[in-house]
Image (cartoon, grey):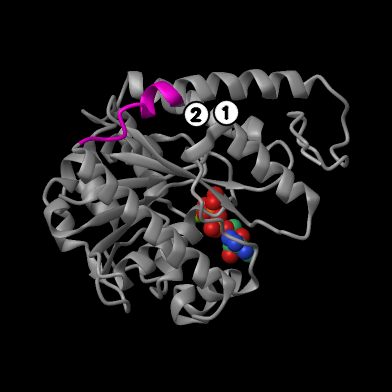
């Protein structure tokens, strides 16, 4: 059974889509059959994987709302071993139409049962909102991967997000694990990036992926060529970083199989670290404004 990983963060522009596309391609290249589900009406994952706008193409909308089986919607991409469930702007309507439907949060989960056996990994790219599309993604997933841009107040954002995830665990998906927090758009020339990364690691420890995604122009260019970065510039830092991330995701899955379970202390640790981060963020938000001091207000400057 494939592992279903939602890529989620309510904040826009943090690298969710870039991660869905490039982690997906890197997993496929590592011979893990992978499906990417574009659950965002912006359809950026769909276009980044080379599918131009086409009103005749069936998308996730037909499955979610009209109950067409997902295997009639799934398409092969140019990457061997990587498939996609595409999206388009009609999906905006889905988040409204779902409101009055039965089991409105669990429709994607039910649809996915038909496909899970065929893949090692299923990645779901979600929109920058906590709407019914994102709730469907989180209800259908085993875990959530949270991309965080290395910027001022990142810690505050991530603690809010983890609070939300804790609430979702009590309601729609009690077994939702944290796959990992991923630092994106990291710029090692700036003190701020380094400080944000240090703060996130000191609060969230091993929940932060060791792999870090650098700010890299090739990652930003590749989507306009309809290709994952691996097929656009394999030697770029961006391509290397996503290959590294795929290795880490695979190694973590193997560790879990070795232990026979999820890491047992995951839930307790998330609750504790979310509470600690909230407290730290609350403490820092009363401090000086401006944000140019290079620190993120959590007081762990080590130099
Ligand atoms: N590591 C990176 N280096 C340089 N540019 C990047 C990087 N990651 C993402 N970008 C660029 O930043 C922009 C936002 O990234 P992306 O679309 O992946 O974010 P998102 O979280 O999916 O956004 P949204 O919330 O709108 O769906 C895009 O133009 C993308 O090409
Ligand atoms: Mg996106």
Q: Which residue is mark 1?
A: 159
* Residue 267 part of the magenta segment: yes
User: Callout 1: helix, strand or loop?
Assistant: helix
Measuring 47% from the left and 25% from the top, which residue is drawn there? 164
**Number of numbered markers:** 2
Measuring 80% from the left and 19% from the top, which residue is drawn there? 286
Residue 162 badge:
2
* Residue 46 left/right relative to 70: right
Toward the viewer: 196 or 75? 196
Q: Position of residue 95 (x, y in %)?
A: 38, 39
Report whether residue 12 is seen: yes
Q: Which residues are magenta?
A: 261-269
Q: Position of residue 139 (x, y in %)?
A: 29, 34
Q: Is mark 1 within 8 Å of ligand 1?
A: no
User: Callout 2: helix, strand or loop?
Assistant: helix
Q: Position of residue 195 (x, y in %)?
A: 73, 43
* Residue 1 part of the magenta segment: no
The answer for how far apart the CA atoms under marks 2 and 1 are is 5 Å
Q: Would you say the residues marked 2 and 1 are in contact, meaning their CB atoms lie under 8 Å apart?
A: yes
Instruction: Decide: few, some or many residues near mark 1? Use Cα within 10 Å; few <14, some 14-19, many ≥20.
Output: many
């Amino acid at each position: 059974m494939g592992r279903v990983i939602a890529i989620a963060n309510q904040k826009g522009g943090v690298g969710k889509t870039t991660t869905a596309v490039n982690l997906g391609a890197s997993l496929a290249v590592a011979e893990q059959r992978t499906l990417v589900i574009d659950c965002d009406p912006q359809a950026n994952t769909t276009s980044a994987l080379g599918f131009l706008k086409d009103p005749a193409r069936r998308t996730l909308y037909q499955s979610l709302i009209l109950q067409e089986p997902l295997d009639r919607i799934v398409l092969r991409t140019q990457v061997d071993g990587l498939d996609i469930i595409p999206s388009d702007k009609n999906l905006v309507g889905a988040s409204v139409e779902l409101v009055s439907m039965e089991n409105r949060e669990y429709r994607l989960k039910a649809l996915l049962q038909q496909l899970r056996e065929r893949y090692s990994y299923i990645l779901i790219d979600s929109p920058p909102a906590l709407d019914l599309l994102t709730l469907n993604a989180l209800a259908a997933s085993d875990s959530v991967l949270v991309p965080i841009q290395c910027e001022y107040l990142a810690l505050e954002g991530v603690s809010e997000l983890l609070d939300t995830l804790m609430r979702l665990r009590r309601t729609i998906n009690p077994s939702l694990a944290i796959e990992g927090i991923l630092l994106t758009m990291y710029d090692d020339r700036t003190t701020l990036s380094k400080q944000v990364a240090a703060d996130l690691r000191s609060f969230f420890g091993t929940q932060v992926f060791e792999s870090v995604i650098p700010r890299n122009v090739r990652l930003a260019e590749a989507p306009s060529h309809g290709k994952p970065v691996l097929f656009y510039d394999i030697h770029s830092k961006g391509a290397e970083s996503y290959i590294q991330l795929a290795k880490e995701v695979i190694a973590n899955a193997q560790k879990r199989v070795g232990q026979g379970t999820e890491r047992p202390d995951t839930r307790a640790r998330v609750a504790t670290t979310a509470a600690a981060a909230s407290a730290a963020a609350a403490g820092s938000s009363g401090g000086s404004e401006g944000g140019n001091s290079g620190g993120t207000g959590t007081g762990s400057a080590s130099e």
